[in-house]
Amino acid sequence: MRQRQRRDSAQEWINSGAAVTVKSYAKRYGVDRYTACDDLTALGFALPESAQQWAQRPPTTPRRTVERGVSQVDDEWWTMLDGRWFFVAGYTSGGAPYGMFAGEMAPHDDPL
């Protein structure tokens, strides 16, 4: 339901004499309590002092991004399989990858 429709419906609900609270408004219209508080305030509904906690929405916290560590390989041929790095040499006709685990490979000392 859009804001205008929600507020029109809420005005009728308030005028009906029902017990309206921030919590009941949020549940009835499927919005969070901050939006419910904003809507009720915009409609001129007198909120009790206890509802003032919903008057100011807290600032958003940025999501933590996963940074690639040194231990992660930046190559399309490597993948993590059973907690170990696996080199994908190719794929079978059925689509299953084949190759070797990193621990199974001999160290390569001579440069190309």
Image (tube, grey):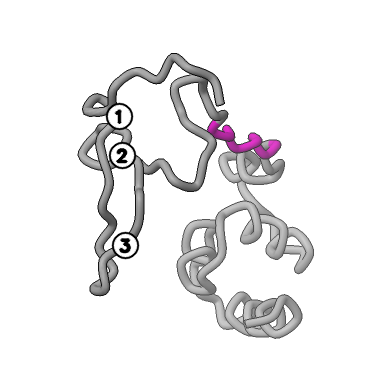
- Magenta segment's dominant SS is loop
Q: Residue under circle 1?
A: 102
Q: Using the numbered discs, state the Cα–Cα distance from disc 2 to disc 3 in whole angstroms.
A: 13 Å
Please identify the quarter of the rendering in which residue 94 is found. bottom left
Q: Position of residue 11 (x, y in %)?
A: 68, 79
Q: Residue under circle 3?
A: 91
The reply to whether discs 2 and 1 touch (Cβ–Cβ < 8 Å) is yes
In this view, 106 is above or below 28 = above
Name the residue located 52 percent from the left edge and 63 percent from the top edge. Answer: 26
Residue type at mark 1?
Ala
Find residue 80 and name its label.
none
The reply to whether discs 2 and 3 touch (Cβ–Cβ < 8 Å) is no
Q: In the structure shown, which secondary structural element does the residue marked by tag 2 occupy?
A: strand
Q: Is residue 101 within the magenta segment? A: no
In this view, 41 is above or below 56 = below
Q: Is residue 64 within the magenta segment? A: yes
- In front: label 2 or label 3: 3
Which of the marked residues, 2 or 1, is nearer the chain's N terminus? 2
Count of numbered tags: 3
Which residues fall within the magenta stretch? 59-66
